[in-house]
Image (spheres, rainbow, N blue to C red):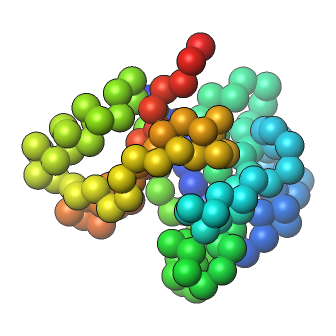
């Protein structure tokens, strides 16, 4: 398991990307923002320096039914951590068996991450954790 990205909720992914570019030297990964209709978000990835390392995922709700809409109403900002795992089902089984978290969004393809499968859990401490299944290569 490795940290894949940190998610940040904002009202405008393009404006926040420009701000992080100017203020912190972040660079954009990929092309224009991707809309994920299943998650109800517009997504843009950024990184620091030449090595992609851990990514920053900017999330903009596409409407009031988006899971990140309420986070934006509270001011936005840091939202979740995402860990890359070899086997998504095994990671979810381990979480269930440990009794420390519940699955709140079952596995689904994520268009912003090359259609790799992702799932979300919430811990007893109310932390939101995303797991993404390792892709080829």
How many marks are shown on the rendered structure? 0
**Quadrant of the drawing holding the N terminus:** top left
Q: Name the residue: 54% across, 24% down.
A: 135
**Residue 38 in sight:** yes
- Residue plotted at (79% across, 25% down): 50
Q: Residue at x 64, y 51 (%)?
A: 57
- Is 80 placed left or right of 33 in the picture? left
Q: Is residue 39 above or below residue 68?
A: above
Q: Residue furthest top?
A: 137
Side (left or right) of 59 relative to 128? right
Q: Please, is residue 113 above or below residue 87 in the view?
A: below
**Vertical arrangement, residue 13 with respect to residue 83, above or below:** below
Q: Nearer the viewer, residue 103 or 75?
A: 103
The quarter of the picture where the C terminus appears is top right
Residue at image point 25% right, 64% down: 125
Nearest the eye: 23 or 60: 60
């Amino acid at each position: 398991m490795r940290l894949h990205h940190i998610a940040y909720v904002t009202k405008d992914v393009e404006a926040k990307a420009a701000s992080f570019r100017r203020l912190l030297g972040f660079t954009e990964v990929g092309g224009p923002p991707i809309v994920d209709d299943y998650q109800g978000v517009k997504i843009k990835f950024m990184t620091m320096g030449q090595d992609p390392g851990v990514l920053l995922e900017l999330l903009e709700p596409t409407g009031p039914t988006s899971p990140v809409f309420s986070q934006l109403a509270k001011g936005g900002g840091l939202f979740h951590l995402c860990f890359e795992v070899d086997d998504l089902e095994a990671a979810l089984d381990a979480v269930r068996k440990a009794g420390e978290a519940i699955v709140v969004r079952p596995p689904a393809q994520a268009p912003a991450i090359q259609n790799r499968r992702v799932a979300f859990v919430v811990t007893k401490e109310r932390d939101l954790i995303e797991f993404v299944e390792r892709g080829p290569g």
